[in-house]
Each structure stands twice: as structure tokens, then as C-alpha cells.
């Protein structure tokens, strides 16, 4: 009996992906749960296992092809394929990948993180649409396309490429990827296995092949490297034309979607964090002994969870189809993390139920996970509000873009010692700039000003948290 297999849901707000690798061919007899494709989405490579055993009759996938969720990926003949009847019984619309992926996990590559049943349940419960608490396919977080020059952490490669590297005895981390995204391809691995150097044939994507990275290669030199791609020229001079990879495309699409559908306003304020800085200096060591880092970001996560409870619109989503505002009664705070692979936003769940000390431990752990590409897609889902702290780098303010379907995002810039007039006296105070972008369909300016003031005052006098005012 011929059955169609459609691309299952890949995660919240993910409607399509690009085929990163095809792992089976037409005519192959495959087992149930055997991986058939790797699909690249905006934040992960998702391994898609087959829900059926049988013979692949038709494969509607090739590397680089874009596939939408729900589109037919393959047709498979399940008769006499040794499926023990299980394949025949399973309706293809019945979340096949989710079921199959559970089986696949047992053979998971060690670098991939295991979604915990609890976390999965919570992640599902946290979604208002689409997720419905269903388990997701196996996920591998992918490098963001900053380019190899900015890389500080380990290289990313899809599971099939890692497998090939293992088979050919190639150390992936010693490679210099030819793809501008910094991702290692099968060709990089094969070239390294052959011992090919810089004079190898160029990649089909136009990227130049390079030799294996010497262990001592100086990152400073890499940072000066120009973007790679096809050389050409426009009216004014020479240019390099570089293909956006799927990750960049998806990021561009999501940012455009948010910026063009949500009427953004950014409200600016400043918080006097002089006392908080003194507190951090005084108790930083104790938090370190507990395995954490006493940071402004961790304090903000806690304060914001409380602020969101008091200002429910900032913890809401808007549904324009039904003209409803969906107020969430859980407080999951996303934190933008700058990683060598690009921007990732892991989510701290139930931040309201955690102490600042606990958050001081959890936040660096999540950031580390993000930097090491250990985040599962679920770790980045179900957020209700996002914080983006650029203060460690610099700046006096910016316009953060709302992480839809959330209603607001808090941008934080660098704390500066400023002269502040206090009772007629100029005093040096540590001032933290706050940039609150909000969805003006749900939130009005006065509400945003009150919200930002509450956060600023709570940073100035944290004991406010204990007063119900
Ligand atoms: N003002 C001044 N200094 C700040 C600061 C601020 N607002 N915020 C952080 N810092 C300092 C910290 O004190 C720390 O200094 P020390 O190393 O001397 O202790 C240093 O910057 C690094 O901070 P951190 O990373 O250890 O800890 P954090 O909790 O403050 O930040 C995180 C964590 C994940 C938010 C941060 O590492 C990060 O990735 N920020 C970038 C977020 C980003 O890219 N946003 C843009 C999104 S839109 O494209």
C-alpha cells in the first residue's frame, strides 16, 4: 500500500525548511524510524525519521530545496516491508515524526541535547498555538551565518556530515568550512580526507575551498577576511555577491514579519543601579560559590517576571483574526544571547517561581548551552517576553525588535557613571539605559512609560518587590 509522508511540524512559527541532506534514495527499503532527511530551519537542523517501514517509491526532496510543513516528502510502499503492520496502522497525519523521533533519540549523536519529557510538556503547554504539547522531531541547533571569521566556538555540521567525518577519520573541529555560514559540508570533509589543500576545486556554491585549519591559526587574521562569494561589480565598483543561506533567510523573514506587522514604539528610560552595583560587588563571590554569576541580566529576569504579573499586557499576544488579546498566566523570559554562531534566544521558564540566586546559576548555563550549540528547539520556545542586554558590549540605547508573538521586549545598554542632580547636588550615579519596544496595537505609550518606570524603580529599590504597590 502506497502511503504519503508529509513534512511534520518543526516547531513554533516554523512553516518551512530547506533540505540540508537526503539520507535515502528512491527504491531503498527503509526501516521505521530510519532518518530520511535533514531539514534546516532558522535555528536548527531537524532530523526527520520515517514513520513507516517500506520501499521508497517517490522522493520529493533534494538538497537545497525548500519544503513547507504539510508538503509531501515521500511516497512509500508499506506492503511486505517487515513493518509488522505498524506502518499500515499509522495514519500519516497522526504526528508521525513526533512518534518516530522518540525512537530515534535512543541512537542520538552525543553532541545533541535530549529534550526532557518535563521540559517538553512545559514547552508545549506554553504555546498558545500550533504546539499543543506534542513532542517535536529531533533537533540540532545550527550555526548562525556570521561567517567563519567570527567563530570562537566549535564548528556546526549536520549529523550526516558528522557521521561522514567519523567514517573518514576527519576531525571536524580542525576544518576550515568553505560555506560562508561557517557550517561544515560533506565536501569539506571529503576534501580534508583526501588531504586536499587551498588549490582544491571550488564548492558548487561558489565558495573557495581552503586547507584544514592549523591548530595555531590566528583568529585575528581570520577576522580580517573579506566576505566570500561570487565576485562581480555594480555601477560603482567591485562587489562580492553572497547567497543567503536558509538561516539568514529565515532570520530576515522573521525580522521583516515582526517589523512590518507590529507597530513598534520604543520607550527610553534610565535606572539608577548604584545600589544594585554595590550589592553585586558585595555578594558576587557568594553567588560564584553557588556556581552562578551575579549579573544585571539575572536580576532583570526576576524583576521583569514580577513586572509582567503587574502589567499583564506586556505578557500578552494579539490575535488580529479574532480581535482578541491573549493574556498568558505563565512568565517565560527569553534572553538574547550573542554566540559565535549568531543570535539565539533561550527561554527561562517560570522565572517568577525562581529566586535571583537560582537565575544567576541558570542564565549562564543557558548562555553556555547556546554558545556550544546544545540548545534544543524547545529551549527557545514558549517565551512571553524577551530581554536583550547589549551593555557588556556598549551603546546608549537601541530599538529592539519584538520577538513575535510577544508584545514587548526590553533592550538594555551599558551602565555609565553619570552626574545626576539629587537634592540640588550633582552626584556620580551608575545609570542603566532601558529601551522598551512594545506593540502599539496592545499597549499604549502611557502604559509603557509606567511599566519602564516600575522596572527602573525596582532596580533602584528592589525591596519594592515585597510591597504590593
Ligand atoms: N552595562 C555594563 N556592563 C554590563 C552590562 C550593562 N548593562 N551588562 C553586562 N555587563 C558586563 C557584565 O558585568 C560582565 O562584566 P564582567 O565580565 O566584568 O563581570 C560583562 O558585561 C559580560 O556580561 P555576561 O555576559 O557575563 O553576563 P550578562 O548576564 O550581563 O549577559 C548575556 C548575558 C547572555 C545577555 C550576554 O552574554 C549577551 O549575549 N548579550 C548580547 C545580547 C545580544 O546580542 N542582543 C542583541 C539582540 S538583537 O540583535
Image (cartoon, grey):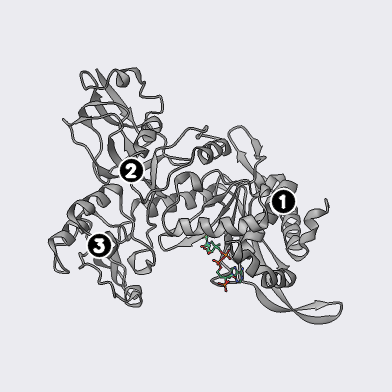
Query: On the image, numbered disc 2 is attached to which residue?
Result: 39
Residue 314 position in % (x across, y down): 67, 48
| Residue 38 sits above or below residue 52 on the image | below
Q: CA distance from mark 2 to mark 1?
A: 38 Å
Q: Earlier in the sequence, mark 3 or mark 1?
A: 3
- Badge number at residue 306: 1
The correct choice, above or below, for 464 with respect to 90 in the image is below
Q: Residue at x 57, y 61 (%)?
A: 291
Q: Residue furthest bottom?
A: 426
Q: Is residue 261 left or right of residue 340?
A: right
Asked whether disc 3 touches disc 2, contact meaning CB atoms under 8 Å apart, the reply is: no
Q: Which element is circle 1 on?
A: helix
Say whether residue 320 is left or right of residue 32: right
Nearest the viewer among 299 and 57 is 299
For the residue labelled by badge 2, is the local secondary structure a helix, a strand or a loop? Answer: strand
Residue 20 image offset from top left, x and y in percent: 29, 46
Instruction: Specify whether tag 3 is near ligand 1 (CB below 8 Å).
Output: no
Q: Is residue 266 visible?
A: no
Which mark lies nearer to you, 3 or 1? 1
Q: Is residue 234 above or below residue 14?
A: below
Residue 182 spot, x, y in % from top left:
32, 61
Please tell me which residue is depicted at 17% across the width and 54% down the height of the picture.
168
Nearer to us in this view, 277 or 105: 105
Q: Ligand 1 is located in which of the four quadrants?
A: bottom right
Q: Extreme front residue here?
A: 289
Q: Nearer the viewer, mark 2 or mark 1?
A: 1
Can residue 363 be spotted in the picture?
Answer: yes
Question: Neighbour class for label 3 at 10 Å: few (<14), some, many (≥20)?
Answer: many
Determine whether the residue tagged by mark 3 lies in a helix, strand or loop: loop
Residue at 37% in and 59% down: 145
Q: Position of residue 239 (x, y in %)?
A: 29, 69
Q: Which residue is mark 3?
A: 178
Amino acid at each position: 500500500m502506497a502511503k504519503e509522508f508529509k513534512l511534520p511540524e518543526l516547531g513554533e512559527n516554523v512553516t518551512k525548511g530547506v533540505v540540508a541532506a537526503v539520507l535515502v534514495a528512491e527504491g531503498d527499503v527503509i526501516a521505521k524510524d530510519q532518518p530520511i532527511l535533514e531539514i534546516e530551519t532558522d535555528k536548527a537542523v531537524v532530523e526527520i525519521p520515517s514513520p513507516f517501514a517500506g520501499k521508497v517509491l517517490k522522493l520529493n526532496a533534494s538538497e537545497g530545496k525548500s519544503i513547507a510543513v504539510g508538503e509531501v516528502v515521500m511516497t512509500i510502499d508499506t506492503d511486505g516491508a517487515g513493518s509488522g503492520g505498524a506502518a499500515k496502522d499509522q495514519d500519516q497525519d497522526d504526528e508521525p515524526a513526533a512518534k518516530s523521533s522518540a525512537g530515534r533519540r535512543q541512537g542520538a549523536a552525543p553532541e545533541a541535547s535530549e529534550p526532557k519529557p518535563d521540559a517538553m510538556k512545559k514547552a508545549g503547554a506554553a504555546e498558545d498555538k500550533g504546539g499543543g504539547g506534542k513532542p517535536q522531531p529531533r533537533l540540532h541547533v545550527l550555526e548562525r551565518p556570521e561567517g567563519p571569521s567570527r567563530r570562537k566556538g566549535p564548528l556546526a555540521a549536520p549529523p550526516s556530515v558528522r557521521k561522514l567525518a567519523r567514517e573518514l577519520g576527519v576531525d571536524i573541529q580542525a576544518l576550515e568550512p568553505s560555506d560562508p555560514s561557517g557550517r561544515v559540508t560533506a565536501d569539506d570533509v571529503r576534501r580534508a580526507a583526501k588531504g586536499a589543500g587551498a588549490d582544491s576545486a571550488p564548492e558548487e556554491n561558489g565558495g573557495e575551498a581552503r586547507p584544514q585549519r592549523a591548530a595555531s591559526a590566528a583568529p585575528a587574521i581570520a577576522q580580517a577576511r573579506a566576505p566570500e562569494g561570487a565576485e562581480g561589480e555594480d555601477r560603482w565598483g567591485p562587489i562580492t555577491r553572497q547567497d543567503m543561506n536558509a538561516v539568514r533567510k529565515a532570520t530576515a523573514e522573521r525580522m521583516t514579519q515582526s517589523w512590518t506587522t507590529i507597530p513598534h514604539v520604543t520607550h527610553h528610560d534610565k535606572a539608577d543601579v548604584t545600589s544594585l552595583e554595590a550589592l553585586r560587588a558585595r555578594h558576587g563571590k557568594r553567588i560564584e560559590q553557588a556556581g552562578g554569576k551575579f549579573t544585571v541580566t539575572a536580576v532583570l529576569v526576576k524583576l521583569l517576571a514580577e513586572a509582567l504579573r503587574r502589567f499583564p499586557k506586556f505578557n500578552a499576544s494579539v490575535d488580529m483574526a479574532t480581535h482578541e488579546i491573549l493574556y498568558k498566566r505563565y512568565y517565560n523570559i527569553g534572553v538574547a544571547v550573542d554566540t559565535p554562531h549568531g543570535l539565539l534566544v533561550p527561554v527561562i521558564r517560570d522565572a517568577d517561581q525562581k529566586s535571583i540566586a537560582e537565575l544567576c546559576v541558570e542564565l549562564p548555563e543557558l548562555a553556555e548551552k547556546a554558545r556550544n550549540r546544545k540548545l534544543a528547539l524547545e529551549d527557545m520556545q514558549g517565551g512571553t517576553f524577551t530581554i536583550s542586554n547589549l551593555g557588556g558590549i556598549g551603546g546608549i540605547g537601541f530599538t529592539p525588535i519584538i520577538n513575535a508573538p510577544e508584545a514587548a521586549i526590553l533592550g538594555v545598554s551599558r551602565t555609565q557613571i553619570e552626574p545626576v542632580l539629587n537634592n540640588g547636588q550633582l552626584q556620580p550615579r551608575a545609570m542603566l539605559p532601558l529601551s522598551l519596544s512594545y506593540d502599539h496595537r496592545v499597549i499604549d505609550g502611557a502604559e509603557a512609560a509606567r511599566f519602564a518606570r516600575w522596572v527602573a524603580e525596582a532596580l533602584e529599590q528592589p525591596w519594592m518587590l515585597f510591597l504590593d504597590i
